Amino acid sequence: MSNDVILEARDLTKDYAGFLAVSGVNLSVRRGTIHALIGPNGAGKTTCFNLLTKFQQPSRGTIYFKGQDITSYAPAEVARLGLVRSFQISAVFPHLSLLENVRVALQRQRGASFDFWRSKSALDAYNARAEELLEAVGLADARHLTAVELPYGRKRALEIATTLALDPEMMLLDEPMAGMGHEDIDRISDLIKRVSANRTVLMVEHNLSVVAKLSNWITVLTRGQILAQGDYATVANDPKVQQAYMGVGHG
Amino acid sequence: MFDFLGIPPQALFGQLLLGLINGSFYALLSLGLAVIFGMLNIINFTHGAQYMMGAFGAYFLLQYLGIGYWWALLIAPIVVAITGIVIERTMLRWLYKLDHLYGLLLTFGLALVIQGMFRHQYGTSGIPYPIPDALQGGHRLTFMFLPNYRAWVIVFSVAVCLATWILIERTRLGSYLRAATENPALVRSFGINVPRMITLTYGAGVGLAALAGVLAAPIYQVNPLMGADLIVVVFAVVVIGGMGSILGSIITGFALGVIEGLTKVFYPEASNTVIFVIMALVLLIKPSGLFGRAASQTSAVEHGGASAAGDGGRSALLFLGVLALFFIISPFFIYPLFLMKAMCFALFACAVNLLVGYSGLLSFGHAMFLGSSAYVSAHAAKVWGFSPELAILTGTGASVVLGIITGALTIRRQGIYFAMTTLAFAQMIYFFALQAPFTGGEDGIQGVPRGFLFGLFDLHNQVTMYCFVFAIVFGTLLMMYRIIHSPFGEILKAIRENEPRAISLGYRTERYKLMAFVLSATIAGLAGATKAIVFQLASLTDVHWSMSGEAVLMTLVGGLGTVFGPVIGAFIIIAMQNYLAQFGQWVTVIQGFIFIVCVLAFRRGIMGEIANKIGKPL
Ligand SMILES: Nc1ncnc2c1ncn2[C@@H]1O[C@H](COP(=O)(O)OP(=O)(O)OP(=O)(O)O)[C@@H](O)[C@H]1O
Ligand SMILES: [Mg+2]
C-alpha cells in the first residue's frame, strides 16, 4: 500500500438479503485531498460511508485506515483513530445549546468525560475554543440558542463545527451542504477548503459546482458499483458518466 | 432397568415430562408474545394475566354454565381474545407512535389491575379444575407412568405451535402480516386494512395465552397469580430465543422447559434459576438471542420523555430546598416512620429516574439492588455486628458489585430488551433470596439492630434515626443533582439525544451507560440498605418484581426526567399504600390504574406538568 493513501477499501460489499447496495467497491483516498463521492440517489454512497466508518458491518471486503485493518473495529474506535463522519440527516444534539454541542466533541478529546462528581462549570474551559469553531461556521451569534431552534442549513454548519472540534485526520461528510442557501454554501465551501489544508476529506455532494470547485478527485458510484474515477474534467467528459449520472439532471 | 447417574428412571422421566409440559406453556406464551411484538412492537406484559384469564374462563364456564373442558378450549380463548381486542382498540393503539417502553408500562399496569381484581375475588389458593373424562388415567410405559392428560397437552401444544408457524410463514395471510410489519403503507396500498390486522393480531396472540391457560387449568389449578411469575420466565425465554423468530420461540420454549425439568432432577436448588443463568450466558455469547437477528449497532433508544427531560437548573435546587424543608417540619405532624419510608423510596425512585430519565434505559429490575443490599446490610448488622453506617456501606457495596455484573451483561440490549433482561435478572436474585440460607426465606431477616451510629448515637432514638436518614437521603439527592450536571452528565445527555452522533464523535457509549447503571444501582442499594436499618427488616417484598414496578410507577407519577419529581411520586404512592392498606388487593388495582392513566394521558408526570406550565425545567 503506498504511503500517501490514508483510507483504502478493497472489495467492499453490502448485501441486504440479496440486494447489493454496495458491490465490490475498491476505493483509495489519498492523504491531504478532497475526494468527492458522487452518484444518483440510491447509488450506495451513504451505505459506503456507513461501512467505512463501521456503523454497518460489510458483508465482504476489508478496510484500511492509515495502513491499519479496521474491518472489525467498533464505530467509536474508528472515530478515535481520526476517521470522523457526519450524517446525511443532520446530526446535532437537539436540546443542547450550540456551545454545548461543540463542547461535547471537545470534551471527548480533552478528557473529563467520566467525571460525575465535578461541576459542569469545569467545561467552561472549552468555551473559548468552542466559540472559535462556531465563529468559523458563522454561528457565533447564535451560540446560546438550542440546536433544535436552528434552520436546517445552519444545523449542518453546527455539525461541521462539531466534527472539526475533534480535529480529525480525515472527515467523511455526507452532503454537508444539503438544504443550505447560497451564502452558507460559499461559506462552508471555503471552510472545507481551508480546513482541508492539513487533513483529508471524503465527501458526498450533489451540488456539482461545489464538487468542481473543491475536489481533487472524484469517484462516481451507480448501483453500488464504481462507474468512473478521476479528476473533474475526466469524469465530466466520460460518456458513461454523462449517460448514467449527468443525464439525471443533478446540479 | 437402568439407572442414570444414580437417578431412578421414574424420577428422570417424570421430570422430563413435566419439563415438556412447562415447555409447552413457555412455547405457547412466547409464541404469542412474538406474534404481538412482530406486529405491534409492544411487549405485552398483560400476557401472564391473560393466560390466567384463560384458566378462569374454563373454570367459569364449568361452574356457572356447566360447559366442560372441550368447549372451554374453544370458547375461553375466544372470549379472552375479545377482551384483548377491546384493550387494543381503547388503549394500545394510542401508543404506537410513542416509545415502545410505554407499551410495556401500560400492559404492566393492566396486568396489575386484572390480577388484583381476581385476587380480591378469589384469594391466592388455587381452585381445582377436573381433567376431562376422556383423558383420565394413563399408560404404564416400561419406564414410567404417562398420564393421558399430560400427553395430550404436549401433543396439542406442539400442534398449535406448528399450525401458527405454518400460518405465518407459509400462507398468504402470514405474508401480509410480515409485510405489514415492515412496510404498512405498502400493504395498505393493496387495499388491506392494516389497523384491523393489528387488532386481530393482538387478539390472536392473547388468545394463544388464554389457550395455554385452559390447558394448564387441570394441571396447575386455577389461581389469580398463576401467570404473574410465569411471564417473567417467559420474558427470559424470549430474550434467550431472540425476538422476531416464530420457530425460534417455539424451539426455545420447549428446550428450556426440558432443561428446567432436568435441572430439577440433577440439581434441584437451581431449577428456579437455571433459565435465568442460561439467559446470562446467551447475553454474553450472542446478545441478540439464539435465533435473533443482530440488531444494528446504531439503533438508538428513542427516549419518550427526552424533550420533557430538563436538567433543571436553579429551579430544581430550589425545589429540593422546599422538599428538605417539608421533611424537616413534617415529623411534628406526620408519623416519622412513615416519612422515613417515604424518604427511602424517594431515593430509590430517583435512582430509577437517573437511568430512565437521563440515560433512556428503562430498568424493570431495580428491586434486585434495593433488596440485595437490604439483605446484606441487615445480615451485616445482625450477624456480623457491624455498626449501622458500616452495615449500610457493606450493603451498598454489594449492590455496586451486582450492578457492575448485571450492567455489563444487560447494557448491550436496548429499549424493551433491556427492560426484560433486567426484569429477568431481578427474578433470578429473587429466587436466590428465597433459597439462600442467610436470607431467612419467607420470613426474611427480622429484628435487625439499629445500633449506635459511629458507636456514639443511639439510633433506637427516633429523632436520631430520622436525622440520619434525612442526611443520607438529601445528601445523595444533592449528589445526584451534581451527577446530572457534571461533565459526565453532559455526555449522558448527548448520548440520549443522539447516540449515533455521540458514537461518531468517538464516545464508547456503552461505557457511559454502564457507568450510569452502576451509579443508579449504587443509589438504589443505599436506599435499600438504609431502609433495612430503619425498619430492622429485610424481606422478599424488597426483591420482588412488583417492587421494581412500583419504582417505575413513582418515577412516572412524579415526572420522568425531572430531577426531583420522583420524590413526589414516591411520597404519593407510599401514602396511598399506607392509607389504603385496609382495602387489600384494591391497592394493586389502583396502582395499575394509575399506571394506565399516566401512560395514556399524563406522561409528563406531576413535576413535568408543572415545569411545562412555568416553562422552566425542573
Ligand atoms: N437497511 C436497508 N435495507 C435494505 N436496503 C437498503 C437499506 N439501506 C439502504 N438500502 C438501499 O440501498 C441503496 C443505497 O442506499 P444509500 O442510502 O446508500 O444511497 P445514497 O447513494 O446515499 O442515496 P442518496 O443520494 O439518496 O442519499 C438504496 O437502494 C436503498 O434503498
Ligand atoms: Mg445518501
Image: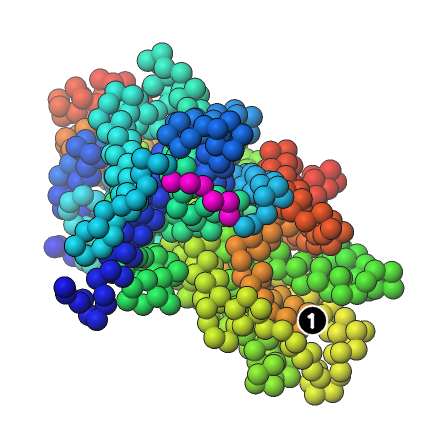
Regarding residue B69, the answer to whether it shows in the image is: yes
Tell me which chain the residue with mark 1 is part of: B
**B268 in relation to A251, above or below:** below
Q: What residue appears at the point 28 percent right and 28 percent down from the top-left corner? A: B168
- Which percent across, then down, holds residue B556? 62, 46
- On whether ligand 1 comes within 8 Å of the CB at mark 1, the answer is no
**A243 in relation to A69, above or below:** above
* Name of the residue lying farthest toward the bottom: B455
Where is residue A221, by image quadrant? top left
Asked whether residue B127 is drawn in magenta, I would say: yes
- Which percent across, then down, holds residue B40? 42, 31
Q: What residue appears at the point 43 percent right and 61 percent down from the top-left corner? A: B428
Asked whether residue B352 is drawn in magenta, I would say: no
Q: Magenta segment, which residues?
A: B126-131
Q: What residue appears at the point 46 percent right and 58 percent down from the top-left corner? A: B427
Where is residue B2, by image quadrant? bottom left
Q: What secondary structure prevails in the magenta region? A: loop
Q: Quadrant of the N terminus of chain B?
A: bottom left
Residue for badge 1: B534
Q: Left or right: B461 with respect to A204?
A: right
Q: How would you rate the neighbour count of disc 1 (Cα within 10 Å): few for under 14, some for 14-19, many for 20 or more?
A: many
Q: What residue appears at the point 23 percent right and 65 percent down from the top-left corner? A: B8
- Which percent across, then down, holds residue B64? 54, 30
Q: Secondary structure at mark 1?
A: helix
* Name of the residue lying farthest toward the top: B191
Q: Left or right: B74 with respect to B123?
A: left
Q: Amino acid at mark 1?
A: Val
Out of A6 and A97, give the one closest to the viewer.
A97
